[in-house]
Amino acid sequence: MSSKPLLGFGFWRSLAEPLLPDPAWFVDAHWAASERQMVLAYLRQGRPLQQWMGQSWCRLGCGNTTLGSADLTDGTYCWPEGLAHYLEQHQLRLPAEIIHHIRAQSAFPSAQAQAIAPYCPVDNRWWLTQRGWLDAASDFSTGSAASDQDLLRRHERNLLDYGPESEEAQQIRRQLLENIRRKWQQ
């Protein structure tokens, strides 16, 4: 079984991970539908790598709170189960390196994906450098006033533990929280 780290992509910014890319940076309504469908078909064949406790939610605020709770792999890359939602519903286009990798496969590498050891390490360093092609930033909310207000209350009462982190991560989190506050003060 392989112990080489998988390359992570498609993991989006949250209060717990403020340094990850914002999905709004990757929207491309002009991406060729045929290529989008080819990429979607590939992503859906991913083999489960890790299962997490709790569902992911749409970072673009459409209100979808059931984007899955697993990470998937093809033996080289690792992506979240809910990544397909962003391509289908919000017209996101993945970076060229990912599309090139997918196009280079004659078929989904099932044997390679199955040879990955459970809890194989995932290297997100490359993904952390991705900034997409749009300067736009999402409003970063769950799309629900009640959920956002609950999040703000838990943060203000120090009920959320983010662990040790850089000043940059703290600064971005403060900005995200301020954006949520502004959204609901209207």
Image (spheres, helix red, strand yellow):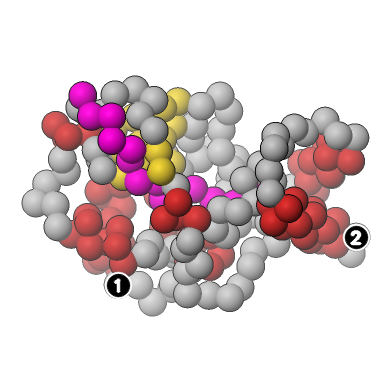
Where does residue 12 sit, x and y in percent of width and height? 54, 51
Which residue lies under the disc numbered 2? 185
Q: Amino acid at mark 2?
A: Gln
Q: Amino acid at mark 1?
A: Ala
Look at the picture and state if 74 lies above or below 85: above
Count of labels in the image: 2
| Identity of the residue drawn at 26% across and 49% down | 41
Query: Residue 32 has which mark?
Result: 1
Q: Name the quarter where the N terminus is drawn.
A: top left
Element type at mark 2: loop
Q: Nearer the viewer, residue 5 or 91?
A: 5
Q: Nearer the viewer, residue 39 or 79?
A: 79
Where does residue 107 sit, x and y in percent of width and height? 11, 46
Look at the picture and state if 44 lies above or below 25: above
Few, some or many residues within 10 Å of mark 2 (<14, 14–19, 20+): few
Where does residue 124 sit, x and y in percent of width and height? 44, 47
Range shown magenta: 1-14
| Identity of the residue drawn at 14% across and 31% down | 111
